[in-house]
Amino acid sequence: QVQLQQSGPGLLKPSQTLSLTCAISGDSVSSDSAAWNWIRQSPSRGLEWLGRTYYRSRWYSAYAPSVKSRIVIKADTSKNQFSLQLSSVTPEDTAMYYCARGPSPLRVWGQGTLVTVSS
Amino acid sequence: QSVLTQPPSASGTPGQRVTISCSGSTSNIGRNTVNWHQQLPGTAPELLIYADNQRPSGVPDRFSVSKSGTSASLAISGLQSEDEADYYCAAWDDILIGWVFGGGTKLTVL
């Protein structure tokens, strides 16, 4: 079955770039029936969808308006994984970050990475 | 402030039936299917119900969903202690062009 394994640093300083990776097993990041999402969860904002990438003859990415100017989600086909980069982080970006497989439903989730932004 | 509205808490005794509501709008629940996720303490959300009322393998039929217009409800019958968790509704929003979630309902089994 599909499994997602997240990795990446958990502590950042303000203005740094958050970088997380989600390694896929049991599926292909290039599957034309999948979409690869990033979602975060915090007590103040609840569950918040950040964006997704997917392959349909070419690569597409879509982002939530709240982070659109700071986010990049991209696939690495050589490693069968996808990544999240969120630039210029502030303490408000402190949250548990999850990757998840779609398109619908969000059937499989990664284990989560707690990211703390603090000076 | 979450796009979908859920009550923050719900409770019941073992064996009881409880319901959790989820209210949205025409751009999300009104046009697209609703999914429900269960989150046990310290773990990632897990898919509980999808496509309005489909259960992944392993999810008992004690869990069911009803939907009408821009609202949906999750019903749990024969409540068990292991059902104590946070429950989230989710739907795709055609205007925001992304997933939207409820604020979550913490279910306590008394």
Image (spheres, rainbow, N blue to C red):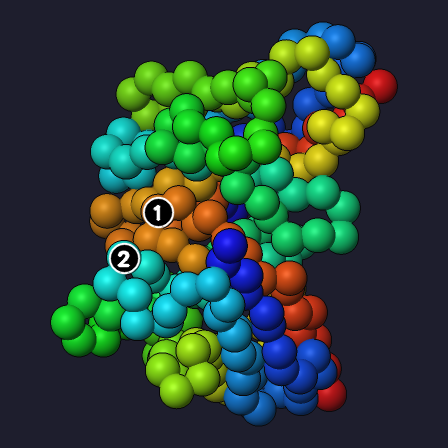
Horizontal side of residue A17 vs A69, given as left or right = right
Which of these two is toward me, B5 or B54? B54
What SS does tag 1 mark?
Answer: loop
Q: Residue at x 39, y 45 (%)?
A: A105
Horizontal side of residue B16 vs A15, given as left or right = right
Residue B92 shows in the view: yes
Residue B7's disc is none
Which of these two is toward me, B65 or B100? B65
Residue A91 shows in the view: no
The x, y position of residue A14, in whole percent, is 62, 87
CA–CA distance in space, label 2 to label 1: 10 Å
Query: Which residue carries the number 1 mark?
Result: A104
Among all residues in the image, which is located at the extreme left? A57
Q: Amino acid at mark 1?
A: Ser
Residue A33's disc is 2
Among all residues in the image, which is located at the extreme top? B16
Q: Residue at x 49, y 35 (%)?
A: B56
Residue A6 placement: quadrant: bottom right
> Is residue B36 positioned above or below B99 on the image?
above
Q: Residue at x 24, y 33 (%)?
A: B31
> Is residue B90 positioned above or below A13 on the image?
above
